[in-house]
Image: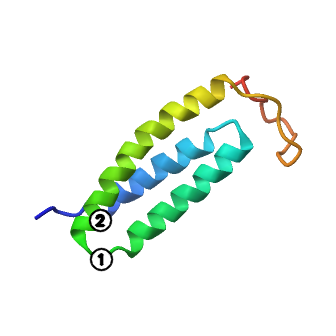
Amino acid sequence: MATPPVRKAILGLYDSTLQTAKSFSSYNFRTYFVRRTEDTFRGMQAEQDPIKLSQAYNEAVKELSVLKRCAVVNQLYGGARLAVEEQGDAPTRGDT
């Protein structure tokens, strides 16, 4: 029987995934992955079956590694900021 991950591990994974999602330089990708991360972890929070929770946790770990690679590529090939983004002192894409 698979042991479910502890709450601290899930919260750590959530923080890492959310931080990586927010590191995308593209507004559309950033908002999509932040929303997707929140939805994924809400589903994990509602899960009662320890086997399904373990599977969801392992899948989220795999997705985090893919998300990190995608974020790096997105930062390398960024463009100008969109009108909906803050135009303040924030660095433009590609300058980070």
Q: Tell me whether circle 1 and circle 2 mark residues in contact (CB < 8 Å).
A: yes
Which residue lies at the image location 79% right of the left edge and 29% below the top edge?
A: 92
Specify the quadrant that holds the N terminus: bottom left
Q: Is residue 71 above or below residue 1?
A: above
Q: Which mark is residue 86?
A: none
Q: Is residue 62 left or right of residue 39?
A: left
Which residue lies at the image location 74% right of the left edge and 29% below the top edge?
A: 93
Q: Give the secondary structure at mark 1.
A: loop
Task: Name the kind of residue labelled 1 in the image.
Answer: Gln
Q: Is residue 72 above or below residue 20?
A: above
Q: Is residue 31 left or right of residue 80?
A: left
Look at mark 1 in the image and give the residue it sits on: 48
Query: Local crowd at mark 2 within 10 Å, few (<14), some, or many (≥20)?
Result: many
Which residue lies at the image location 60% right of the left edge and 58% below the top edge?
A: 35
Q: Which mark is residue 53?
A: 2
**Mark 1 vs 2, N-terminal side:** 1
Q: Is residue 64 left or right of residue 20?
A: left
Task: Name the kind of residue labelled 2 in the image.
Answer: Leu
